[in-house]
């Protein structure tokens, strides 16, 4: 099938290349000329394992091209909208400027029978509004097909999703949309991927409630970590033990410096704002608490560093291991790790931060920080070491080797990803979150 993908960020670029892998012919469209020129050369504008490989093979096959010209969407049967919906400046609500602009720009190039497919995460009610706009300006239909990909596993999550959700219109247009989407996702359908066909509002809500649930799970375990800290209990064992209950499950129960990234934080805030608009603010008022618990973890990690230095961080060297919001990503949007580095710098510490992938993005946002490509440079003469992104490189650090570089003997494990016994045996003071 001929597809267009409008918006070539984390979601769109992966979607475009993955759709070619599935046998389709795709044009990727974005207003950012620099991004388009990189993608056209088969280079990914961000770090995503497996993406460069499928980009290059897709371009070589002649079935993937990129352009800044929205007119080139004409002729495609399906048009995916994958632009960003960031948090509005100074507000909790989502900024829908890019979604609205993409749809408005696309309408003149839609042909009768085309299907516009929203993938961006939007406040409930957006699809119904956009459907009216599309209906007024064309003979195309709209479906809402939320995306559940995780950064770091984006290619796999797109090609082999764990479920498909189609939000479609009532009646004939809805049936047409289902049949078109089933052709787009023919391989996933053939593999018996669970499929939920529903209305627009449910499809929109599935996405935001999934992210709200994940955020709640993480903040739940971080709240337990706070209680564990007050009682000498071990939150990692607690997570294992409750996780054996299949109704609870062990995944997303890792306590630490908390969640960040371009999705979970802004999605729970946008959900709260939308619920308030709908007069149902109290239904999701707990998400404010989830947000607050999450942000407290950053305070806690900063405080542990301050305490380790007896309250005097000024001009003390602190090695910050990790900047990305999670491993296998160079994304530093709302990254707890970067936030910890910035706050310690603000307290006057001599912060030297390192990360295998996220230094360039961190430097763009915070040029005042000192970065080291080689973790050894961050560790050398450090008074305190703090791990805030659980990259394998940091998990595998050997206490004996770090002892030869660092001056101090305190390690703060902001991701509970190290073995406390190993570090203590080597003479270190180990401090995790919710771990004795
Ligand atoms: C998240 C969802 O997991 C995806 O399903 C969704 O499609 C995506 O948002 C989106 O809306 O686009 P992502 O932001 O890539 O994906 O990252 P996650 O893997 O969910 O991690 C989010 C944050 O939670 C990270 O900072 C991670 O370190 C943190 N986390 C995760 C924990 O602190 N503890 C855990 O146990 C798990």
Image (tube, grey):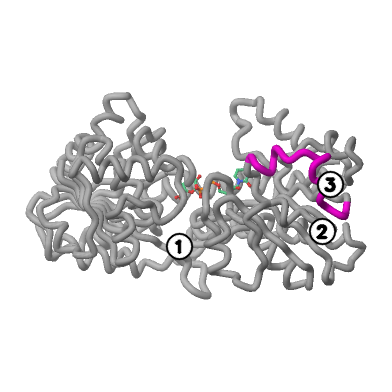
The image shows residue 390, relative to residue 87, as above or below, that is above
Where disc 2 sits, the SS reads helix
Front residue of 72/245: it is 72
Residue 177 appears anywhere in the view: yes
Q: In the image, which residues are magenta? A: 392-408
- Numbered circle sitting on residue 189: none
Taking the image as shown, residue 189 lies to the left or right of residue 84, namely left
Taking the image as shown, residue 313 lies to the left or right of residue 207, namely right
Taking the image as shown, residue 200 lies to the left or right of residue 383, namely left
Q: CA distance from mark 3 to mark 1?
A: 53 Å
Q: Residue furthest bottom?
A: 90
Q: Which residue is mark 2?
A: 305
**Magenta region, main secondary structure:** helix
Query: Around disc 1, counting alpha carbons within 10 Å, would you say few (fewer than 14), some (14 to 19), or many (20 or more)?
Result: many
- Closer to the N terminus: mark 3 or mark 2? 2
What's the residue at 29%, 53% (across, down)?
41
Is 405 covered by the magenta stretch? yes
Q: Which residue is mark 3?
A: 404
The image shows residue 258, relative to residue 249, as above or below, that is below
Residue 219, percent across and down?
66, 49
Query: Around disc 2, counting alpha carbons within 10 Å, would you say few (fewer than 14), some (14 to 19), or many (20 or more)?
Result: many
Q: Which residue is mark 1?
A: 274
What's the residue at 89%, 35% (across, down)?
425
């Amino acid at each position: 099938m001929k597809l267009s993908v409008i918006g070539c960020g984390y979601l769109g670029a992966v979607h475009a290349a993955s759709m070619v892998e599935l046998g389709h012919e795709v044009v990727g469209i974005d207003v950012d000329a620099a991004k388009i020129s990189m993608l056209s050369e088969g280079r990914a504008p961000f770090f995503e394992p497996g993406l460069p490989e499928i980009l290059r093979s897709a371009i070589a096959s002649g079935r993937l091209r990129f352009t800044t010209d929205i007119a080139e969407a004409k002729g495609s049967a399906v048009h995916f909208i994958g632009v960003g919906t960031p948090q509005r400046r100074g507000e909790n609500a989502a900024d829908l400027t890019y979604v609205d602009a993409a749809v408005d720009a696309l309408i003149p190039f839609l042909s009768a029978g085309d299907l516009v497919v929203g993938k961006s995460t939007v406040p409930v009610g957006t699809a119904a509004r956009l459907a009216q706009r599309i209906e007024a300006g064309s003979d195309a239909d709209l479906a809402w097909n939320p995306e559940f990909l995780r950064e770091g596993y984006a290619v796999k999550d797109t090609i082999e999703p764990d479920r498909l959700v189609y939000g479609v219109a009532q009646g004939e247009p809805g049936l047409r949309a289902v049949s078109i989407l089933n052709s787009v996702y023919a391989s996933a359908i053939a593999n018996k991927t669970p499929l939920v066909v529903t209305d627009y509002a449910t499809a929109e809500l599935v996405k935001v409630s999934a992210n709200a649930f994940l955020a709640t799970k993480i903040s739940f375990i971080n709240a337990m970590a706070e209680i564990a800290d007050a009682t000498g209990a071990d939150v990692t064992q607690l997570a294992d033990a409750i996780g054996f209950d299949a109704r609870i499950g062990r995944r997303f129960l890792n306590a630490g410096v908390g969640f960040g990234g371009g999705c979970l934080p802004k999605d729970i805030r946008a959900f709260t704002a939308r619920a308030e608009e709908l007069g149902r603010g109290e239904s999701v008022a707990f998400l404010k608490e989830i947000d607050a618990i999450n942000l407290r973890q950053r305070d806690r990690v900063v405080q542990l560093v301050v305490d380790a230095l007896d309250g005097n961080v000024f001009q003390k060297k602190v090695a910050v291991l990790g900047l990305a919001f999670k491993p296998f990503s160079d994304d530093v949007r709302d990254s707890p790790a970067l936030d910890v580095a910035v706050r310690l710098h603000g307290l006057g510490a001599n912060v030297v931060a390192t990360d295998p992938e996220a230094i360039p993005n961190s430097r763009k946002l915070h040029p005042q920080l000192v970065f080291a490509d080689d973790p050894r440079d961050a560790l050398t003469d450090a008074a305190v070491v703090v791990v805030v992104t659980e990259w394998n490189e940091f998990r595998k650090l050997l206490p004996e080797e770090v002892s030869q570089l660092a001056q101090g003997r305190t390690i703060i494990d902001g991701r509970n990803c190290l073995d406390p016994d190993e570090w203590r045996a080597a003479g270190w003071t180990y401090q995790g979150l919710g771990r004795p």
